[in-house]
Amino acid sequence: MLSRIKDIAANLAPRLIEIRRHIHSHPELSGQEYQTAAYVAGVLSSCGLHVQELVGKTGVVGEMLGSGTDSRLLAIRADMDALPIQEKTGLEYTSRQTGIMHACGHDVHTTVGLGTAMVLAQLGETLPGTIRFLFQPAEETAQGAGWMVKDGVMQDVSAILALHTFPTIPGGCVGIRYGALTAAADDLEITILGESGHGARPHEAIDAIWIAAQVLTTLQQAISRTHNPLRPVVLTIGQITGGRAPNVIADQVRMLGTVRSLHPETSAALPTWIEQIVASVCQPFGARYEINYRRGVPSVQNDPALTQLIEVAAHEAWGSDRVQLLLEPSLGAEDFSLYLDHAPGTMFRLGVAFPDQPNYPLHHPQFHVNEAAIVTGVVTMAYAAYKYWQN
Ligand SMILES: [Zn+2]
Ligand SMILES: [Zn+2]
């Protein structure tokens, strides 16, 4: 079976590169993936899948029905959106949209999703269970997965698989991570409310700028003393505004930031912990505060059995020197985690680095992809899907 999957994928390689370049040169922003979605729906229909459009706003779902001998339903997820970045790769198939670029490899994810459907369709064999292909919008704004889930795409799903391109892993290699893959990312807004007064008479006022400074430093110091250092938390205040004039004591300071963590228990405790610190700093000086803690996406926690399924499939397909076990998670965020509230799943990293030229990080205007990775992704995904029902 593996050699048949590899043969079909190898024959499809030129077509897959064509698909990827088409998507790459026609990028669309989060929530506006109309052309990409129509294109995806067209390819899925041509493979004989049952296709539903406008799921999760601009998402597409394609179903490949199994024989029904196994009731387990496997979902495979790809994301379709691009970023507001002006591409500077100089490639012949560079973005045709000014200021929009596939700089996160979602063009590759979409192509691998389509390629997996094409390969499995060409196998000429009905799988025991059904595969549902999810092409979601708006991953970059962490909204698309939620929209898809709300529209019921996780109904009856037993397991879900996904991948993400990774520019520090060589093209043709696969990165496997057990446990936490990405962080929970929440938005934090703290407003310190003091009392205005003359800059020369601080004792008659409540200085919101000075108290905000205490809050900021206390938060950063307290992280290192109150959280388990093996369970990381990153709190970054990236924006701060307050004050009106050099000689007027500020009555209000607003701080905006992002909070990242890896462990679900840590994540759950963070809003209360932050409020305790802010309250303890404000209280002695008579300042008031408002905190707005908005939950973003949770951490992606890869399921052990499904991660092993991918690892074994990749090992059989490519040999051990092309499979890397990743020792560290990322403090980036992925809305794939929202599907994992409904079924176990795993996301693996698809290496896209070139051996002989500079490689750029994700979200960089010169980010580029070693297209050899596409076949690696398709074979790994298709073979893992095939093996899913053998277990
Ligand atoms: Zn991204
Ligand atoms: Zn991404």
Image (cartoon, rainbow, N blue to C red):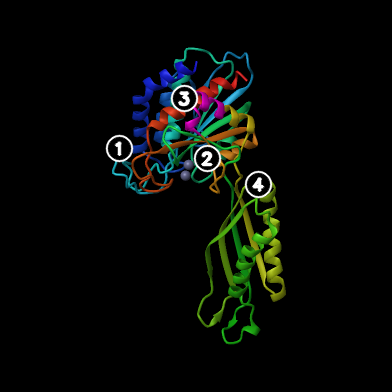
Distance, label 1 to label 3, CA atoms, is 25 Å
Q: Which mark is residue 263?
A: 4
Magenta region, residue range: 310-323
Decide if residue 341 is in sight here: yes
Q: Position of residue 336 (x, y in %)?
A: 56, 38
Distance, label 1 to label 4, CA atoms, is 41 Å
Q: Which mark is residue 144?
A: 2
Number of disc labels: 4
Q: Position of residue 203 (x, y in %)?
A: 65, 84
Amino acid type of the residue that numbered disc 3 sits on in the rendered structure? Val
Q: First in sequence, mark 1 or 4: give its number.
A: 1
Local secondary structure at mark 1: loop
Look at discs 2 and 1 and give the one toward the viewer.
Answer: 1
Question: Looking at mark 2, is its residue's CB closer than 8 Å to ligand 2?
Answer: no
Local secondary structure at mark 4: loop
Distance, label 2 to label 3, CA atoms, is 26 Å
Does residue 360 appear left or right of residue 341 in this picture? Answer: left
Q: First in sequence, mark 2 or 4: give its number.
A: 2
Q: Which mark is residue 93?
A: 1
Callout 4 environment at 10 Å: few (<14), some (14 to 19), or many (20+)? many
Task: Residue 314: say if magenta.
Answer: yes
Amino acid type of the residue that numbered disc 4 sits on in the rendered structure? His
- The reply to whether discs 2 and 3 touch (Cβ–Cβ < 8 Å) is no
Amino acid type of the residue that numbered disc 2 sits on in the rendered structure? Gly
88 vs 80: above or below: below
